[in-house]
Image (cartoon, rainbow, N blue to C red):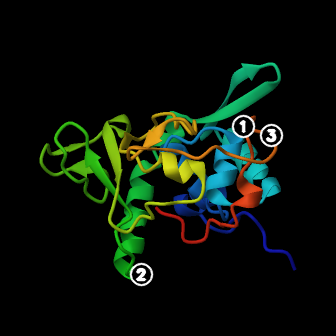
Amino acid sequence: MALGKDYATQECSIARALEVVGERWTLLVIRDALYGVRRYNDFLVHLGIPRAVLAARLQALTAEGILEKRRYQESPPRDEYVLTDRGIALWPTLRSLGLWGREHFGESRLRWFRHADCGTELGPYGECPRCAMIVPVPDVEMAPGPGLDRDPADPVSRALLAPRRLLEPLDTDPRRPVDGHPQEPEGGGRGPGGVADAASGSGRSAEGRPV
């Protein structure tokens, strides 16, 4: 018997939320969108997700108003996926979930999340203890922590080595320096997102990806 996708018997707002974001990969797609990933191929490369699954998750999140599809190139037509206010509102949930995972599974710190204005590390709900305020997501600065791989194989992970604000569009241009060193050019064919597809040759999956 196939497992249903809804919780029809549950009168619970958590159940309603899980119907939207509870499927495998969905929260990781939203995480990457918060990090500034917007294009299909960048999601594909960074997550190591099957193409059909990624297409389904992007379509579902767009239908639910969590992502907005925007045209960034007309010829040939190509789109990117940008978080809406509804999607950005999931940031405190992902922040808390990441801290919970690190605390209970003994993982080393992979990323710092700080208030860009004062440099203070955020609390579990995205608050700045020093400024006594919930930090707007665009004012959150993300930087690599001691447990993050400093020599990743894929261009998205390499681009994410540079300190950056959340939601800032990710630049995976291989000519842009990261930690003082140019990125290596991408290889492979063209993916539906419109940039070179390096996923097939990376030999990496999303299991254990940084949160």
**First in residue order: circle 2 vs circle 3:** 2
**First in residue order: circle 2 vs circle 1:** 2
Badge number at residue 105: 2
Residue that appears at 52% across and 38% down: 170
Disc nearest the viewer among 2 and 3: 3
Disc nearest the viewer among 1 and 3: 1
The picture places residue 2, in percent across and down from the top left corner, at: 85, 75
Secondary element at tag 1? loop
Residue that appears at 20% across and 36% down: 117
Residue that appears at 48% across and 60% down: 151
Report the residue that reaches farthest toward the top.
74
| Three-letter residue code for mark 2 | Phe
* Spatial separation of the CA atoms under disc 2 and disc 1: 36 Å
| Three-letter residue code for mark 3 | Pro
Q: Give the position of the N terminus as an image quadrant.
A: bottom right
Side of 113 relative to 187 (left or right) = left
Residue that appears at 49% across and 45% down: 159
In depth, the one of 16 and 37 nearer the eye is: 37
Query: Is 84 placed above or below 5 here?
Result: above
In depth, the one of 2 and 61 nearer the eye is: 61
* Spatial separation of the CA atoms under disc 1 and disc 3: 8 Å
Reading the image, the residue beneath label 1 is 195
The image quadrant that residue 46 belongs to is bottom right
**Total labels drawn:** 3
Secondary element at tag 2? helix
Query: Is 163 placed above or below 79 here?
Result: below
In depth, the one of 64 and 128 nearer the eye is: 128
| Three-letter residue code for mark 1 | Val
The image quadrant that residue 191 belongs to is top right
Side of 116 relative to 151 (left or right) = left
Reading the image, the residue beneath label 3 is 192
Side of 73 relative to 137 (left or right) = right
